[in-house]
Every structure is written in C-alpha cells, then in structure tokens.
Amino acid sequence: MKVVVCVKQTPDTAATLTVVEGKAAWGDAPLVLNPWDEYAVEQALRAKEAHGGSVTALSLGPESAKEALKQALAMGCDEAILISDPGFETADSLVVSAALAAAIKKIESPDIIFFGKAAVDTDTGVTGPQVARRLGWPSLNLVAAITQLDPGAKTITVERLLEEGRQIVRSSLPAVVSVVKEINEPRYPSFMGIRKASKAVIPTWTAAEIGLQPIPAPALTWPEVTAPARAEQSCEFIPGDTPQQQAAGLVERMIAEKLI
Amino acid sequence: MDFSLGPEHELVQKMVREFAQKEVAPFIQEWDRKQQMAPEVLPRMGKLGILGICFPVSLGGQGMDFISLGLACEELEAVDTTLRVVMSVHVGLCGLSLLQWGTEAQQEEFLIPLARGEKIGCGAFSEPGAGTDVANLQTTAKQDGTDYILNGEKMWISLASKADFALLTARTDPSPKRRSQGLSSFIVDLRSKGVTTGDIKGKLGVRAGSTGWISMQDVRVPQTARLGEQGEGFKITMSAFDSGRYTVAAGAAGLIRACLEASVAYSKDRKTFGQPIADHQLVQAKIARMASDYEIAKLLFLKAGWLKNQGVRNTYETSMAKRFATDASFNAASEAIAVHGSYGYSDEFAVERYLRNARGAMIYEGTNEIHSLIQAGYALGDRTDKALRREMPGYDPERWQAV
C-alpha cells in the first residue's frame, strides 16, 4: 500500500517560548521532528510492514525542514519530499493544507495519509482534517488505535480517543488519519536508516511544481503576539499564638480576598 | 579543516541520546542505590544496534565509524557511566580486539554474535595482584595437546557476571627473557567448566553496573580460541587498551557535559543574596572551567577517533584524551557539587553520582599516573610506536557497509 505521512519541523518541546517585538520567538532552540509526528511516522511504518508498499514523508517548510525529513527517513520511511517556497512563509493552516493536498495529488494514488494530532508550535490540530476536506476523503482524527486495515477491501477501523471514552469508527480508504500518542511507541532510527538518511537527496517541490499558483493568501494572520502578564507572587505570614488563632486569621484573610 | 559533524554523526548522537535519556535516565538513581544493573540495559542496547555500532555490517555490526562510537559513548555517559562501561568492554576491549587480531573463523564464531548483541563480551586483564603491571599477571595457560588449561583469577572485570565471552591474557611461558613476553590472549567462554564469576559490591561508583571477578580452575580452552600467536598477549592487551581508552575518553567528555548542564540549570534557578547564583562570579568561574574542559575533552577524543578512522596508530593521542577527560570529569563533578551546595551532596541531584562515577575512570584502563608516564615517554622521545603484526584497520565505508 502507498502510505504518506505529513510531518513538520518544530522547536524542541524543552524550548522556552518568548515574545520578541510582537512575534513568538523560540530562541536558538534545536529544531526537531514534531513530537506528535513521530507517532504518525511510526504508524505509517507499521502499516507498510503489515501490508507492504512504501512510506513517503512529506513536509512543508524552509530548506532546514529537511532535517526533520531526515529523521523520518532514518526511522525507516522510503522517501521524503519537501514543499518549499518563499510564498509559504506567512502560510496559515488553510494554505498549508492546500499545499499538502496539492502535493499528495502528485503522489501516485496513496491509500492512507497519516498526521500527528497537532504541531507543538502552532497547536491548531486542524491541518489533517483540512487536508481530508480538500481531498474529499474521510477524516479520522484523534486516533488511538487502528484495529483493522485492509488495503485490498479499502477499509479501515479505528478507535478515536474522546473525553468520554473510545469511539469505534469504520471508514473507507483512502482516508486521512491523525494520531494521538496512545497509538504506539515510536521507534528510534536504526543505524542503517541513519546512513540512508544522511546520504538521501530530498527533492524540493515549489508552489508552481504542485500547481498551487498563485499561493492563496492566508485567512489568518498574527499581527501581534503578546506574552501573558506575569503573575505577581507574594508571601504573607498569618500571625497567631496558637494554630486556632492562625486558622481564624487565615479564614478572615480568605474572606476578605473573596476566596471563600 | 572542518570541525562540524555531518548529518550521519548528528543523527547517531540524537538517537543514542534519546535512548539514554528516555529509557535509562528516569530510573538510574534507583538502580544505582540498589547496586544492580537494570536488566533491560544490555538487551535494549543490543536490539538498537549500539553494541555493534562500529563493526562492519558483514560481521554483524552497524557499519558506523569510530567517531560514531565516540559520540555514542559521550551520550551514554552523560546519563550514567555504567552504560559507557558496557561499550568499553564489549566493543572496546573485546570486539575491537577480535576485529584487529582475530582470524576469519574467530570473527565468525565470536565477533558476529557480539556485534549483533546476541552475546556479551568483556575484557579481563587485571588480577588481584596485577593491574597496571600487566606483565606481572599470574593466570597461567598450559598447553595440553591442542588445548590450553587455564588457571587463575581476574579481578575488577566489568560485566564479569553478565558476559558470555572474555578476552583475557594469561602466561603461557613461565620463564621468558622479559616478563612482557610469554603472555598469550584467549577468548574464553565464561560458561565453560571450571569458570566461576561474581560481582563486587560496595564500590564507590558505577554502582548501576556490573564489576566482578572471574575465577578459573583447570579451564580447557581450545587452541582455536587463542587470539593472535602464542606469546603475543602483551601486544594484544596493549592494543585492546587503545580501543577501550578511547571509549573512556569519549564517555568522560559526556560526564563533563552532564556536570555542566546540571550546574547551568541549577545556578539559574537557585538564588542567594537576592540573585541567581549564576550571577556570582565564583560560580561563573566553575561553569567556565567545565565548559572549556568539555570542549578540550571533546576535541581530544574526536581527534583520536579521526586517527582511528584513518587507520593511524593513536596510543599517544588516546592516552592524552583519556587522562585529560577523566581528570577533568572528576573536577567537573566536584565543582558541580559545589554549585549545588548541600543539595549536591545528596542523591536528590545526580551530581554526587557523577563524582563517584568519575573517580573510577582515573584508575581503570591505565591509571592516570601511568598515562602521565606514557605521555612523558612519547614527549621525551623514549617511546615510539612499533609496527604490530596486525594493525587496527582504518574505517573504510565501503568495506564496513558491504553486506
């Protein structure tokens, strides 16, 4: 089966997010394969291992995003493609999903597209469903288990993780599946994969090459980002000779502050 | 000259770091307290290919180079010394000696299962009465037909009780002209009749590892398990150290880095006199020393690794890397405790474990005192490398990666 996994390069989750001149800044945090996408890559590899075929990792981003694609290749993906164009610099998820959908149409008849549930930097979690909508395919998101996958019969059954429990959903293929971390334990890259990834030449597709001209304007912009106000903290000792007096004093203060 | 690591080395670094940080770091304190090795460590390192990282693919390995080996050791020891010790004895002393000196049949029999991580190897040279003074070892190997009968005891042997094979050196000629002659090396199956092994408890450090003894009473070893020629044991032992010490050096660089990272984080968090202690100049002096020592240690081991890749003898460079990095790691750990104050003195923080672990590496694989003498020997021109019958092969990507 033909499997595509869409990945994004994001700052490391240990990075500290700050605001610099009205823009979100990650400092010099190392850039990594979006942690949620590691689960998507793992699931894509498992689908290939169970049913044969190949896995293509697809990303949209600057040239440096090839590093995230290399991580996906080192984990075992067969090939990687970067969609990159200066026109995508201000892209919102609608533009990104348009580009990804256009690129996926260029890839020969994929059976299933995997996404992580969200990217840790923008955290919208809508790119996967938007791609599904653009392709006209079923969207299965927040998937915590794939209990049945049959590329021959073109069917898939998944468990979606909801607050109330798990929802079992049956769908036809091709479909877009976004996964949560409960679905698997991502593998480490193998040394053979590392060698393959480090030598791989990753093709870059421009907006023109995927037929997305002109690049649509983003519907969403972030004119200014502000940091949340810092909470002021202070410590006050409640006087009292006995624990009873201290407790009574504490209750009075709490009532005065309208805490109780 | 290019100081950057390529994508291959960066991915190796990242992969080993993720394994050590994710699978070992959360539990290491517990195992250190128990003085036991976590049972999953060796199988996991085997499964991930780390135990065979730098051996040719055709010999069961992963086909990476010596720099990758060093980087892996750095990442492992940044979490705990015991992980790197596994590499020193399994890959360094045992596996690489087989690569250098083993016949095709020996590589087939012993190296392939080691490189695949199916069997564990160790190196057994020290004895209750002979450590640095290798030529004085007392274990004997007497020829009996086509076999050898081994008797003696080996002490302070990492993985003694876990390993399947030990590369060990014994005396085959009781009265040679020079004491360093008349020694021979053997690959001994530690499940053989007459072999008993055990762990040593109560060590200052490397408590989550396995350090033990091997006792041999009339252990029959076939001639096919003799590594190299009879009488070549001293040279084989010394070249095993060239490999083992490299892993110690690289690991110690990781330990310095761990001390540095812990000190940076703590000094920004902890406040005294109304400001983070990172603002105090005497704390900064400690951190500056750790940062520069890390860079020096790293440059030294990477140079030694580069020489190994080129197939150039590196006894001198590896000795310098080992002594500098292990001394510096002990100092870094001590200073990291100073940065942490009283908290650093308790096992609430990892730095006290770093100090205990760092001390051992100043003793094993040649005490740092003997390394001073080795280095002085080279610097004074009293010591030169003599060609060996079999040199360690340099890294040849084509040969290493051929299936």
Image: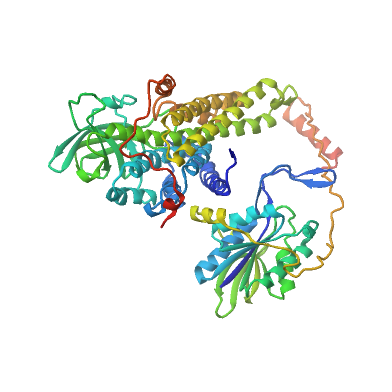
* Rendering quarter of residue B298: top right
Horizontally, residue A225 falls left or right of residue A104, namely: right
Q: Residue extending furthest bottom?
A: A153
* Residue A89 seen in the figure: yes
From the viewer's perspective, is residue B91 above or below residue A140? above
Q: Nearer the viewer, residue A50 or B60?
A: B60
* Residue B348 seen in the figure: no
Horizontally, residue B76 falls left or right of residue A105, namely: left
Please give the count of numbered marks on the rendered protein.
Answer: 0
Which corner quadrant holds the N terminus of chain A?
bottom right
From the viewer's perspective, is residue B186 above or below residue A7? above
Could you say where residue A158 lies in the image, as x and y percent from the top left?
Answer: 60, 70
Could you say where residue B92 lies in the image, as x and y percent from the top left?
Answer: 40, 39
Picture residue at 78% right of the left edge, 56% below the top: A89
Q: Residue extending furthest left?
A: B145
Colour pattern of the rendering: rainbow
Horizontally, residue A66 falls left or right of residue A241, namely: left
Q: Nearer the viewer, residue A122 or A30?
A: A30
Which corner quadrant holds the C terminus of chain A?
top right
Horizontally, residue B91 falls left or right of residue B10, namely: left
Picture residue at 31% right of the left edge, 52% below the top: B108
Q: Nearer the viewer, residue B402 or B256?
A: B402
Q: Nearer the viewer, residue B198 or B229?
A: B229
Picture residue at 83% right of the left edge, 35% below the top: A253
Could you say where residue B206 lies in the image, as x and y percent from the top left?
Answer: 44, 33
Picture residue at 69% right of the left edge, 73% below the top: A105
